[in-house]
Image (cartoon, rainbow, N blue to C red):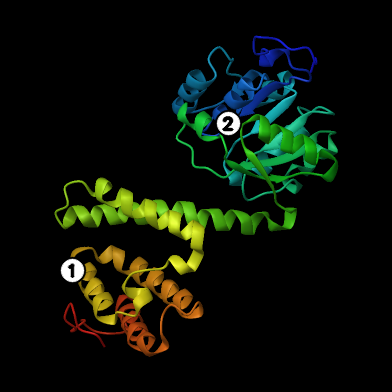
């Protein structure tokens, strides 16, 4: 950058080493990342997408960027974002390399959480520079995603000689790079899925149950509660555990199981699994007293046996502890 001071902010497009950017797979992630790179001065030049939704997303987030084939994306771009589903990624990389679409010196970036850079080995053999940049965020497919990238952590895996380049791209998108070793990618991704994906399921299920209980605005009721629980968990980990399981209140847990069997039998298995996991963690961290744990674990075990069909009809009342 020129050291001279200007009263006007410099145009990002005037920065050195700006790259042409292509997107293969116009799902929810690719267009948002390309739009973020555009704000940093890079130039999206091509995007590929098949479904009507992909075409609409590309048009909304990357207006005037032509929709072309994957091979043509690689022909036009210096930096290529492969933003396809995990299971499709190995075949896509292999196919692009076999057809000669990959060029030496081209930056090939995938956004899969599951994979590191080994999945890009065919592109590497063709002379490309492989990067794995996974944004740890859920995407909506709308412009709000570009704003949410500010401060978002990215799981970064790359050859050591490309580490600085990978981290620089993340920073340009407004993110925070977090280095993940190649062999740790599957565990890293499992951890994120366990938290984020299952959280959505739990919240949606909780809202449905509150509606059945007559709550008119379950989202309004849950918002402050879940926000506080998430904040406490991030700050304190297992020390933030509260509720009947952490207290060892077996009677209340038995009542929950009874009500769920009556009104939402599809929720029983998930409730029992999470309650058992919570009990194990509460015991391990000294929150659940051993003298209260036995009755609680009996309730959970009996509930699981009933779900699995090894007991007959549950005869316990809603407040009865076994």
Reading the image, the residue beneath label 2 is 30
Position above or below: 154 against 271: above
Residue at x 46%, y 52% (from the top left corner)? 197
| Residue extending farthest top | 7
Tag 1's secondary structure?
Answer: helix
- Judge by depth and name the residue closer to the eye, 2 or 259: 2
Looking at the image, is mark 2 or mark 1 earlier in the sequence?
2
Task: For the C terminus, give its image quadrant.
Answer: bottom left
Label 2: how many Cα within 10 Å (few below 14, some 14–19, many 20+): many
Q: Which of 226 and 301 is in front in this view?
A: 226
State which quadrant residue 98 falls in.
top right
Quadrant hosting residue 306: bottom left
Q: Residue at (76%, 31%) from the top-left corner?
A: 107
Q: In which quarter of the image is the N terminus?
A: top right
Residue bearing the label numbered 1: 262
Q: Mark 2 and 1 residues: CB-CB less than 8 Å, in contact?
A: no
| Residue 198 appears in the picture as rendered | no
Percent from the top left, x then y, of residue 148? 51, 34
x, y percent for residue 174: 61, 32
Residue 89 in the image, given as x and y percentages of width and height = 64, 42
Q: 39 or 94: which is nearer to us? A: 39
Residue extending furthest toward the left = 214
**Foreground pick, 301 / 94:** 301
Q: What is the CA distance from the residue labelled 2 to the residue labelled 1?
A: 44 Å
Left/right placement of residue 55 relative to residue 74 reads left
């Amino acid at each position: 950058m020129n050291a001279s001071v200007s009263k006007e902010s410099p145009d990002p497009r005037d920065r050195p080493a700006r790259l042409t950017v292509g997107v293969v797979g116009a799902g929810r992630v690719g267009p948002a990342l390309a739009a973020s790179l555009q704000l940093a001065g890079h130039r999206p030049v091509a995007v590929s997408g098949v479904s009507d939704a992909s075409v609409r997303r590309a048009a909304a987030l990357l207006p005037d960027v032509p929709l072309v084939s994957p091979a043509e994306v690689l022909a036009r771009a210096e930096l290529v974002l492969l933003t396809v589903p995990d299971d499709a990624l190995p075949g896509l990389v292999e196919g692009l390399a076999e057809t000669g679409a990959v060029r030496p010196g081209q930056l090939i970036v995938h956004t899969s959480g599951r994979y590191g850079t080994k999945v890009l080995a065919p592109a590497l053999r063709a002379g490309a520079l492989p990067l794995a940049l996974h944004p740890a965020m859920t995407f909506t497919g709308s412009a709000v995603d570009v704003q949410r990238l500010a401060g978002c952590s990215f799981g970064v895996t790359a050859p050591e000689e490309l580490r600085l380049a990978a981290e620089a791209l993340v920073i340009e998108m407004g993110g925070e790079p977090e280095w993940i070793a190649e062999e740790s990618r599957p565990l890293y991704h499992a951890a994120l899925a366990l938290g984020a994906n299952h959280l959505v399921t739990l919240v949606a299920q909780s809202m449905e149950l509150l509606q059945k209980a007559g709550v008119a605005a379950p989202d309004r009721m849950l918002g402050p509660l879940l926000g506080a629980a998430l904040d406490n968990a991030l700050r304190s980990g297992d020390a933030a555990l509260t509720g009947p399981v952490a207290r060892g209140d077996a009677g209340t847990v038995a009542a929950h199981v009874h009500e769920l069997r009556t009104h939402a039998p599809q929720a029983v298995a998930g409730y029992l699994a999470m309650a058992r996991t919570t009990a194990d963690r509460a015991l391990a961290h000294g929150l659940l007293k051993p003298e209260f744990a036995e009755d609680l674990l009996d309730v959970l075990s009996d509930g699981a046996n009933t779900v699995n069909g090894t007991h007959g009809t549950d005869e316990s009342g809603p407040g009865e502890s076994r």
